[in-house]
């Protein structure tokens, strides 16, 4: 089966992001950018399906400015076969991303689409579910186990307090949770090879999608600071403070 | 203006998260109805009707909604949503699963994980794992909202006597089937819902030593978490990870043991009401967010703490 994997370029998870002083947006100048961790898990899952003989071709797609080709190359180095960049400017809302990905699905007709459950910048956790609605496909969100079972897909999902297993008709949309797999590191030879793999560039117009805007960012601000705490001398003082000052234990 | 709250329930009773969503709906200042979709869910619908301030309860009781399959429930909500200005649900895994699908069916944006209602169209929500708070304004006529439950004190579960109206619409998308569900049968509370969390980091040295946290967790009724460093080192499984790429928690008391306080961990727990850090390194960044810091060797401090609780 053909597998489509969506990857997003985001601020590296080790970077502490700050609001700009004027509160108009976050400050992303000279900040290290990486592939979104959940998208990396999505790519790894697709590569494992290919290694298992289930997937025949992996197409990695990213939506964004030209710089996101770097993250597509990362996916190619991890084992994707070819890439598609849908060129957009500035931030694109999840609903529009879902519409663009629906356009890519219509062109590519994959049997399985794997996305990260959320990106660690906007933390929206929406795109996969929206895409599933627009494409009228089954969804297996927050997946921790994915098994192809004949013409269906068995997905175990992380839900509050436990796990849920569903059987989905194909084609289907999967979004990844942390436990699904541990992504590999790209080897240097594979990084070199990835540079030669095909990467097509499309515009929203090519996909018949209008980039609409539903939300306005009014301002950004740092969260309320925690007031400085104290150091306690010993365990006795700690227990006393928790009981009598913070009153959080009985 | 009117708001539809999507109830979270197990057919028998309402989940407490419904009351947090209700509180956010009240902050919107509109008339509020509640949708209970399930199978054999009349008891949950009656519980919803008892919540103060509810206009009416819409009860869609059909086998196709029994397991909250997103493909079916989203079609139902999108239909029932027609007369409402706001559709509000708790940002639980269930709400996160269903609501974006509803938003896409309605061709509107979703505003996820709202922590404050500024006005009828303007909301605050954390981005970058809570390192930044964004204020966003929606231009959609219909707003689909999920609510971070820890940010809204629950609305009272009683004081109301709303009518319950049956909704006959049956939407079976035929795309997915429920196979099974395992809810962890632990005596400990679930990590994201626990009032107290005790987490271990790389300082625990190995998985075996996490047993030292169990005795304390048992005494406090706490859940046990871990830092990414402890997970990456293979001490404990991924599902215990608290942090930006793991679980976001905001308990009344968070005890960080042998955790240095990497940004990625702080992002997952810094909204806890009281934070305790136990670490032998006086300079560990975790102490900068801790209300009470204890500079000590955890291998002596933990047994002592357990004996004194």
Image (spheres, grey):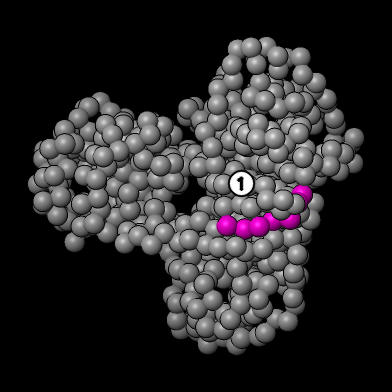
In this rendering, position of residue B186 left or right of residue A7:
left
Is residue B231 something that shows in the picture? yes
Q: Is residue A116 found left or right of A56 in the rendered image?
A: left
What residue sits 79% from the left and 23% below the top? A199
Left or right of residue B264: residue B223:
left
Q: Nearer the viewer, residue B15 or B21?
A: B15
The residue drawn where x is 54% and y is 58% is A164
Residue closest to the eye, A41 or A26: A41
Rendering coords of residue A194 (x, y %)? 71, 17
Q: Quadrant of the C terminus of chain A?
A: bottom left
Task: From the viewer's perspective, tell me whether residue B146 is left or right of residue A55.
Answer: left
- Per the image, the residue denoted by label 1 is A146
What residue is rendered at 21% in x and 44% in y? B212
Quadrant in the picture for the N terminus of chain A? top right
Q: How many marks?
A: 1
What is the span of residues highlighted in magenta in the rendered image? A165-171
Specify the principal SS of the magenta part: strand
Position above or below: A222 against A76 = below
Q: Position of residue B44 (x, y in %)?
A: 53, 79
Count neighbours of disc 1 (C-alpha within 10 A) and say few if under 14, some if 14 to 19, many if 20 or more: some
Say if A109 sits above or below B142 in the image. above
Residue A169 is a magenta residue: yes
Q: Which residue is at 66% across, 21% downward? A: A77
Q: Position of residue B69 (x, y in %)?
A: 65, 64
Q: Is residue A15 magenta?
A: no
């Amino acid at each position: 089966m053909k597998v489509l994997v969506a990857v997003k370029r985001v601020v590296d998870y080790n970077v502490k992001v700050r609001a700009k002083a004027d509160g108009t947006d976050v400050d992303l100048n000279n900040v290290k950018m990486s592939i979104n961790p959940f998208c990396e898990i999505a790519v790894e899952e697709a590569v494992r399906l290919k290694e298992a003989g289930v997937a025949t071709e992996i197409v990695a797609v990213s939506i964004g400015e030209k710089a996101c080709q770097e993250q597509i190359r990362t996916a190619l180095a991890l084992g994707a076969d070819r890439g598609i960049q849908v060129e957009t400017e500035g931030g694109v809302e999840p609903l529009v991303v879902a519409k663009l990905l629906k356009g890519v699905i219509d062109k590519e007709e994959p049997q399985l689409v794997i996305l990260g459950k959320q990106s660690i910048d906007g933390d929206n956790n929406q795109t996969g579910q929206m895409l599933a609605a627009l494409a009228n496909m089954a969804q297996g969100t927050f997946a921790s186990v994915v098994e192809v079972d004949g013409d269906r897909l068995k997905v175990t999902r992380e839900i509050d307090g436990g796990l849920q297993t569903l059987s989905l008709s194909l084609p289907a949309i999967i979004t990844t949770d942390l436990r699904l797999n541990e992504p590999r590191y790209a080897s240097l030879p594979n990084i070199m090879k990835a540079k030669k793999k095909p990467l097509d560039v499309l515009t929203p117009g090519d996909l018949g999608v209008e980039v609409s805007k539903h939300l306005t960012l009014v301002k950004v601000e740092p969260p309320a600071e925690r007031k400085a705490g104290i150091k306690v001398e010993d365990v006795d003082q700690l227990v006393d403070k928790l009981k009598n000052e913070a009153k959080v234990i009985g | 203006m009117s708001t539809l709250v999507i109830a979270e329930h197990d057919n028998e009773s309402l989940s407490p998260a419904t009351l947090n969503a209700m509180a956010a709906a009240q902050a919107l200042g509109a008339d509020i109805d509640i949708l209970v979709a399930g199978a054999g869910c009349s008891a949950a619908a009656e519980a919803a009707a008892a919540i103060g301030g509810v206009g009416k309860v819409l009860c869609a009781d059909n086998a196709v909604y029994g397991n909250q399959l997103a493909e079916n429930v989203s079609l139902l909500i999108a239909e029932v949503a027609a007369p409402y200005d706001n559709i509000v649900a708790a940002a639980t895994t269930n709400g996160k699963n269903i609501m974006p699908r509803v938003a896409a069916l309605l061709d509107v944006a979703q505003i996820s994980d709202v922590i404050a209602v500024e006005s009828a169209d303007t909301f605050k929500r954390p981005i970058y794992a809570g390192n930044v708070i964004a204020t966003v304004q929606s231009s959609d006529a219909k707003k689909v909202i999920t609510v971070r439950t820890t940010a809204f004190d629950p609305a009272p579960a009683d004081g109301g006597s709303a009518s319950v109206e049956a909704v006959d619409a049956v939407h079976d998308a035929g795309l997915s089937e429920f196979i099974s569900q395992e809810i962890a049968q632990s005596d400990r509370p679930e990590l994201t819902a626990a009032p107290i969390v005790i987490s271990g980091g790389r300082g625990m040295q190995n998985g075996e030593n996490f047993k030292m946290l169990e005795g304390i967790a048992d005494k406090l009724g706490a859940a046990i978490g871990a830092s990414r460093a402890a997970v990456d080192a293979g001490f404990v499984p991924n599902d215990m990870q608290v942090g930006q790429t793991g679980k976001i928690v905001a308990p009344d008391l968070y005890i960080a043991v042998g955790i240095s306080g990497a940004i990625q961990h702080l992002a997952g727990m810094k909204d806890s009401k009281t934070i305790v850090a136990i670490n032998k390194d006086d300079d560990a960044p975790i102490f900068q967010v801790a209300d009470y810091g204890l500079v000590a060797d955890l291998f002596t401090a933990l047994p002592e703490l357990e004996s004194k609780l």
